[in-house]
Amino acid sequence: TSSDQRYFLRLEQLTDTGFAQHEQFGQLLFAERCFLARALKFDEFTGGNFEFGAQASAARAAYDPDGTAALPALSAAIGSDRQMVEPARFVAQRVSAAGVPAYVYRFSYVAGSKRGAWKGAPHATDIPYFFDTVAAKYGPDLTPQDAAVARAINAYVVGFAKTGVPGGTGLPTWPALSGKGPLMDFAATGKPVVGQDPWQARLDVTEAVADR
């Protein structure tokens, strides 16, 4: 099909072709979502049965309350929440409900050398902080704040490995999950902050349509 046709390809058309049974269907759907994001307004993108259905207003409030977000960014946020972030919360909630302490975090810190290039912390950028390998990761671009954040996060990891509870001397207590919160946010400021998930509204609306 032409690129113009691909922009407006509907989910119903894609599934009617039989691709729904193909192992790459998830990747194909994400690709089509990106094409749609180039051409559709947010109301159209989240309306009807394509994304949130009756939850479209709640989704708009959670993802784009002032109507200024770029559609490719919205597509990426919605896709990652559905495929990774909300399912991770679901698993943590089930573990907690079974009586096993679960500790949830949000990683919001961006390395000093990347703040001009990254709008928020990309996926997996927490790893060198948890293992305190930021010196190898960022080399001469490493800042003192980067190193301090890594030491603090790694202390939580070591505490968890030793005792089953993440913690370290002089660090804020990391509480176990209860319901939908709280969690530990390794914040953009470089400080560990305990509170409700800053993405809770997004994840709640994603959960609401998960079984559609």
Image (tube, rainbow, N blue to C red):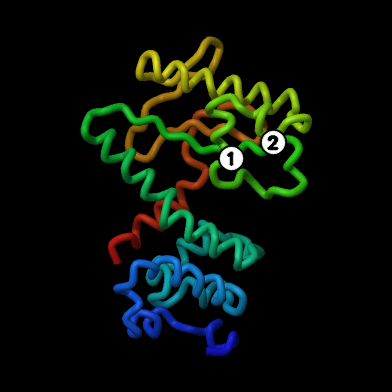
Identify the residue shown where x is 32% and y is 74%.
20
Identify the residue shown where x is 63% and y is 25%.
149
User: Does the residue at mark 2 contact the one at mark 1 (Cβ under 8 Å)?
Assistant: yes
Residue 133 image position (x, y, % from top left): 61, 27
Kind of residue sitting beneath label 2: Ala
Relative height, residue 180 to residue 161 (above, below):
below
Where does label 1 land, which residue? 125
Where does label 2 land, which residue? 111
Residue 176 appears in which quarter of the rendering?
top left
Identify the residue shown where x is 47% and y is 60%.
79
Relative height, residue 53 to residue 13 (above, below):
above
Relative height, residue 27 to residue 187 (above, below):
below
Residue 191 image position (x, y, % from top left): 62, 27
Question: Is 204 on the left or on the right of 39, as rendered?
Answer: left
Q: Find the residue positioned furthest to the left.
A: 98
Question: Cα distance, mark 2 to mark 1?
Answer: 9 Å
Mark 2 surroundings within 10 Å by alpha-carbon count, few (fewer than 14), some (14 through 19), many (20 or more): many
Question: Is 50 on the left or on the right of 77, as rendered?
Answer: left
Near-viewer residue (49 or 39): 39
Mark 1 surroundings within 10 Å by alpha-carbon count, few (fewer than 14), some (14 through 19), many (20 or more): some
Relative height, residue 29 to residue 197 (above, below):
below
Mark with earlier residue (2, 1) = 2
Using the image, tell me which numbered label, if any, was put on residue 82. none
Kind of residue sitting beneath label 1: Thr
Residue 112 image position (x, y, % from top left): 74, 35
Near-viewer residue (91 or 56): 91
Residue 124 appears in which quarter of the rendering?
top right
Image quadrant holding the C terminus, namely bottom left
